[in-house]
Image: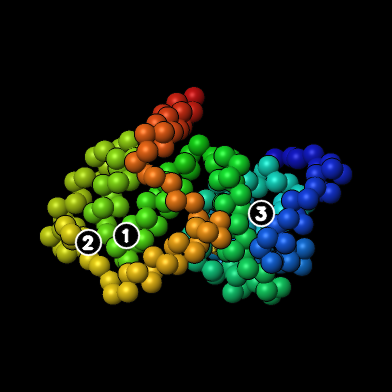
Amino acid sequence: MKWFISHDTIRSPFLKTLEKDCGEKVSRCYQCGKCSAGCPISFQMDYLPNQIIRMVQLGMEEQVLSSKTIWLCASCLTCTVRCPREIDIAEIMDYLRRRAYKKHMIPLDETEIPLFNKIFLRNIELFGRLYEMGLIAMFNLLSGEFFKDFSLAPKMFLKQKIGIFPQGIRNLKELRKIFRKSGKLGRARRDNLLHPKLIFLNLSRKFISKIERLK
Ligand code: SF4
Ligand code: SF4
């Protein structure tokens, strides 16, 4: 794909803002490609991690924020530990996800990823550890795929991979303090997952993405 990169794009404040907010010097990247060579998800990405970094250097905000890559990144930190310029690429991916979310620039194919993230975090906040049954039920309900993987549940239950009831942890209050502080710092938005508006938004995105796939 060919892109026209204008002077305005290169001089856009995108790179400066990102470096300031993340505390990561993206401009130090010399495109060695070690991050992409070690990334376990790269085969699914539309742009490799080093390409994303280069696009950030060039101020290509729109292309970066609308890419699938930032949503597919599993935050495994492989790229971060391999980078010879000590750039925390996983942190940058996280920042880009938050920015794309705020600007409503999530690719239609990937709208379930932020929904999954929200349900996962709310689950941890409530119980202190993952309650798989609750996560699956909530995700299926809000994504509109009510019976997705339904047939797997009995097998997983019999093999004790999932339990019917949640298991708590000690010091749950301390954990919740972290969530509260994170919310105050603006690092996490606590949406009411069962709010009718959110349910409607999720289901309509799903419907639109299905129609797009049929085209
Ligand atoms: S490993 Fe670091 S220096 Fe190399 S391409 Fe990736 S971000 Fe750039
Ligand atoms: S943190 Fe993301 S981009 Fe980096 S190696 Fe892991 S999956 Fe790939």
Which residue is disc 2 drawn over?
Answer: 166
Q: Which mark is residue 52?
A: 3
Q: Residue 91 carries which label?
A: none
Residue 20 at x, y percent in the picture: 72, 62
Q: Gap in Å between the C-alphas at discs 1 and 2? A: 10 Å
Tell me which numbered mark, 1 or 3, is placed earlier along the sequence.
3
Depth check: give the residue in front, 39 or 195. Answer: 195
Depth check: give the residue in front, 156 or 174. Answer: 174
In this rendering, position of residue 121 left or right of residue 55? left
Residue 101 at x, y percent in the picture: 55, 45
- Is the C-beta separation of discs 1 and 2 under 8 Å? yes
- Looking at the image, which residue is at 70% across and 57% down? 18
The quadrant holding residue 168 is: bottom left
The residue mark sitting in front, 1 or 3, is 1
Tell me which numbered mark, 1 or 2, is placed earlier along the sequence.
1
Tell me which numbered mark, 2 or 3, is placed earlier along the sequence.
3
Depth check: give the residue in front, 175 or 17. Answer: 175
Q: What residue type is labelled 2?
A: Pro
Ligand 2 image position (quadrant): bottom right
Compared to residue 71, the image places residue 78 above or below, namely below
- Looking at the image, which residue is at 38% across and 72% down? 174
Q: Gap in Å between the C-alphas at discs 2 and 3? A: 39 Å
Q: Residue 126 carries which label?
A: 1
Q: Can see residue 113? A: no
The CB of the residue at mark 3 lies under 8 Å from ligand 2: no
Residue 178 at x, y percent in the picture: 45, 67
The CB of the residue at mark 2 lies under 8 Å from ligand 2: no
Q: What element carries label 2?
A: loop
Label 3, residues with CA under 10 Å away: few <14, some 14-19, many ≥20: many
The residue mark sitting in front, 2 or 3, is 2
In this rendering, position of residue 24 left or right of residue 5? left
Label 1, residues with CA under 10 Å away: few <14, some 14-19, many ≥20: some
